[in-house]
Amino acid sequence: MTLLLLLLIIPFFAGLGLFLVRSAGLRRLVLLVTAAFHLVLSLYLSIPDSNPARGAWIGVDSLSAIFLVLTSVLFLAIGFYSIGYMREHSAPDHGLHEPRRIDPEALFMGCLLVMLSAMSLAIVARQFALQWVAIEATTLASTPLVYYHKSRKSLEAAWKYLIICSVGIVLALIGIFFLRMTLPVKFHSDLTIDALLQNASTLNTKWLKTAFIFMLVGYGTKMGIAPFHTWLPDAHSEAPAPVSALLSGALLNCALIGILRMQQVSAAAGIGDFGAELLVIFGVFSIVIGAIFILRQPDFKRMLAYSSVENMGIIALGVGIGGGGVFGSLFHAVNHSLTKVMLFFAAGSILSRFATKDSSRVQGVIRTMPWTGGLWIAGFLAITGAPPFGTFLSEFAILRAALDKGHYFTAALFMFLLFIIFVGMSAIMLGMVFGARTVERRSESLLSVVPPLTLGVALLVLGLYMPDVLQAKLGSAAMLLEGVAR
């Protein structure tokens, strides 16, 4: 428990301390050291098989272990990329004339670390109200990051993000109130997962279904599930590249795990089919919306944002299908996070060099930026589920589960939508890579190439070989969500 508290506390206070640090070198050192410490501690707490103490408000089980290590790996990569990004980008005024009491880079890196602490708490929280507080804290910590460039569009995106996600979090809070009503009177003050699972057979299923609906809509807003996703394209498009990567690769998973915990309780209470049906409906709808808006999308960062909507739908669909689909969904969450962070890194480098997000004005990336162009192609293949990347295996697992469960129409629709998305993204992304060079070629910095390249290699490895420890964690987590084990 002490080490877990350190995992949460140190990034938080390091982030607050960075608000006051004037030395850019010291800020960057603190960011990387804290990120590395978080990764080492996450691995130490997550890899061994352990069960959280019964009734504990925080703890690491197989489900939280997957997302905790994933978040930590992504954050370390984002930390390295952010250092290079900060060297090339400052926070312009754009005529808004705001007083700067804190250095923009200090605010940026400080908010990153505070957000890491909040995301970690959301993942390891085993008490629903505490998890709600942590998810709300991620919104407050990330809003200044969306607004970093201080343009009028980024201001609009930040307000939209804050307001819509706050409405969603209020709905989730109402869901928690209803969840409290499901418990016997003597347990009303105990909203831990253990208390709910222990009393699963006596829970009031009507209140539980109501709570599930409110929490699905509330956390689904933060997760980017359609039709509650409307903040996501603006925030991902206007935020700096490392922030877009963090939002898509790590933050969406924090809301996802809140929904998964509710499905875990519902399955234990015998109403897993109720939640599963809702997840299938919203999952398919999200894939449809993602496919529609990806087609002929002129802004390549918004295209990646709608891809996040689509992939969150794929994850929800797999969990709703059940069986092997749950395993596939959890594996897909890992693959999607790695892929999307890599792609937003590449998108940030392309935007920096071409000074436009209009894909029609970007050509010859492979000639101008060979490393970034190659990573952009690899990311395109990975995000569309092409072999040999891990996303192919995770999507295939979901498709196979749908067929095994007799969901033939859903499986056919799933395949059709994936084909549409492949065609739509290929027209945009491959068109950007090839063609005549339109800007001068310059050398690419290591900090803009090594982080996405490392993630790309990890994706390729997961497509060819799944480590035993990861397979065991995914299998155990899938059993939790199916109500088979605790």
Image (cartoon, rainbow, N blue to C red):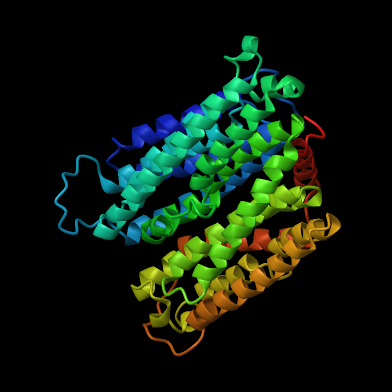
Please provide percent x and percent y for residue 300: 45, 70
Residue at left offset 38%, top offset 75%? 358
210 relative to 110 in the view: left or right: right
Q: Residue furthest right?
A: 404
Residue at left offset 83%, top offset 58%? 406
- Name the one closer to the observer, 203 or 18: 203
- Counting labels gives 0
Please provide percent x and percent y for residue 117: 48, 34
Please provide percent x and percent y for residue 402: 79, 58
- Name the one closer to the observer, 61 or 191: 191
Residue at left offset 63%, top offset 22%? 182
Q: Residue furthest front?
A: 206
Whether residue 135 is visible to the viewer of this picture, yes or no, is no
In the picture, the quarter occupied by the N terminus is top right
Q: Residue furthest bottom?
A: 436
| Above/below status of 58 relative to 407 | above
- Name the one closer to the observer, 119 or 161: 161
| Above/below status of 252 relative to 262 | below
67 relative to 235 in the view: left or right: right
| Above/below status of 442 relative to 193 | below
384 relative to 248 in the view: left or right: right
Q: Residue furthest top?
A: 186
Please provide percent x and percent y for residue 366: 51, 81
Whether residue 343 is visible to the viewer of this picture, yes or no, is yes
In the picture, the quarter occupied by the C terminus is top right
- Name the one closer to the observer, 256 or 56: 256
